[in-house]
Image: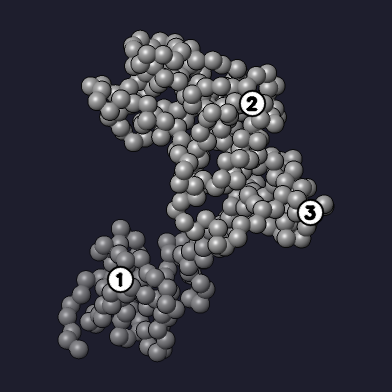
């Protein structure tokens, strides 16, 4: 060991400086602190203020004893027990535990407050799905046709989008009498009746549609063609295409009297066709060539309507009679128009049934 003169308060022996990142118990030390250990005991402790903010340096408590544990002396003179878990680890563990508990609490509240979410099935819903309904056969009651839970006292009704499941209870009570069996060999060909304008429609279905309207008295069917499609939306778009002149310089204006069905503008402009375009309220329309959409009873106000602009010349009218059934309004006359739209979703509630 090389001797050297040292100023007062500094040890005369050479010192071994260890830049410590970890204490002997595995805990982190402040990155600005240094552990200064003397190779021999004795001597007055020195102060190291380099990169330590002027605070006392950390010195070895037992430089010879073979122990790798060091203790930090604070300004208060108290010592931190070397074997205790550091405060930082305790804080991290507590934070993790709180996060897990919070997630569990949020999930529980979500399940309680959203019992009808598609991904959440409560005990009440399981009972509703599995329990047979009175007056129905086992096959009919085993699975709901809607694929969703029934309406309860705390259900929320979305007035922006309809789903006519209110007829489901009626069809369940009807039981086996409402069953329809289609043989596997039927409807295999593209053609059901080549002599009909709608050549893919079953002749028996055509006859039953006419029979239903005659019985109810809501539409004149003699001398008319019955066409089927995948919902009124497809038939409406087909009517717009058929009624628009192919050689017109400007697109044909499509109008409806306000308040009108909110889906009319979207359906009209969906294909961005150059043959027709949405032109808004029929009350403010000025022009010759137009297609007027007449909904009666009207959605959304239920009013009975006739064409405002009338049909004639370059103007045509499409009558949407989806709600012209006795369960919605009194049937006072047989509707007799060139183009009339009806739908199974409103007449019988079979919104998911697609034919044609």
In the image, residue 29 sits, relative to residue 107, either above or below, namely: below
> Residue lying furthest front in this view?
195
Direction from residue 125 to residue 322 in the image, left or right: left
Considering only order in the chain, which callout, 2 or 1, is on the residue closer to the N terminus? Answer: 1
The answer for how far apart the CA atoms under marks 1 and 2 are is: 96 Å
Viewer-nearest of labels 3 and 2?
2
Front one among 34 and 320 = 320
- Mark 3 or 1 closer to N-term? 1
Is residue 93 placed above or below 23 in the rendered structure?
above
Reading the image, the residue beneath label 2 is: 218
In this view of the protein, can residue 87 be seen by the observer? no
Badge 2 density bin: few <14, some 14–19, many ≥20, Cα 10 Å: many
- Position of 142 compared to 247: left or right? right
The residue wearing badge 3 is 136
User: As displayed, is residue 6 above or below residue 326?
Assistant: below
Instruction: Tell me which residue sits at (30%, 64%) in the image.
Output: 32
Residue 152 location, quadrant: top right
Q: Quadrant of residue 68?
A: bottom left
**Percent x, y of residue 250:** 26, 21
Q: Is residue 154 left or right of residue 66?
A: right
Q: Are marks 1 and 2 in contact (CB under 8 Å)?
A: no
* Quadrant placement of the N terminus: bottom left
| Element assignment for label 3 | loop
In the rendered image, residue 38, in percent from the top left (x then y), is placed at 31, 81
């Amino acid at each position: 060991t090389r001797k050297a003169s040292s100023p007062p308060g500094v040890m005369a022996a050479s010192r071994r400086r260890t830049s410590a990142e970890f204490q002997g118990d595995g805990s982190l030390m402040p990155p600005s602190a240094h552990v200064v250990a003397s190779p021999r005991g004795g001597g007055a402790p020195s102060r190291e203020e380099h990169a330590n903010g002027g605070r006392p340096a950390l010195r070895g408590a037992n430089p010879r004893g073979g122990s790798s544990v060091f203790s930090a002396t604070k300004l208060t003179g108290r010592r931190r027990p070397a074997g205790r878990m550091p405060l930082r680890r305790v804080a991290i563990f507590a934070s993790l535990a709180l996060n897990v508990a919070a997630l569990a609490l949020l999930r529980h509240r979500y399940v309680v407050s959203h019992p009808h979410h598609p991904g959440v099935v409560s005990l009440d819903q399981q009972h509703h799905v599995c329990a047979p309904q009175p007056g129905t056969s086992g096959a009919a009651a085993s699975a709901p046709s809607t694929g969703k839970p029934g309406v309860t006292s705390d259900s929320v009704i979305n007035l922006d989008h309809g789903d006519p499941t209110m007829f489901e209870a009626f069809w369940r009570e009807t039981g086996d009498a409402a069953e329809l069996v289609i043989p596997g060999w039927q409807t295999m060909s593209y053609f059901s009746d080549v002599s009909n304008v709608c050549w893919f429609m079953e002749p028996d279905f055509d006859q039953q549609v006419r029979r239903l309207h005659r019985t109810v008295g809501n539409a004149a069917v003699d001398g008319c063609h019955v066409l089927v499609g995948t919902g009124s939306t497809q038939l409406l778009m087909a009517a717009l295409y058929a009624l628009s002149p192919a050689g017109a310089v400007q697109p044909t204006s499509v109008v409806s009297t306000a308040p009108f069905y909110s889906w009319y503008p979207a359906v009209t402009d969906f294909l961005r066709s150059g043959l027709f375009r949405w032109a808004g309220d029929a009350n403010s329309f000025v022009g010759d060539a137009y297609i007027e959409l007449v909904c009666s009873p009207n959605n959304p106000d239920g009013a009975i309507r006739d064409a405002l602009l009338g049909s004639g010349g370059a103007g045509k009218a499409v009558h949407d009679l989806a709600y012209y059934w006795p369960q919605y309004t009194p049937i006072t006359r047989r509707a007799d128009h060139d183009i009339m739209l009806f739908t199974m979703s409103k007449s019988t509630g079979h919104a998911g049934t697609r034919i044609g």
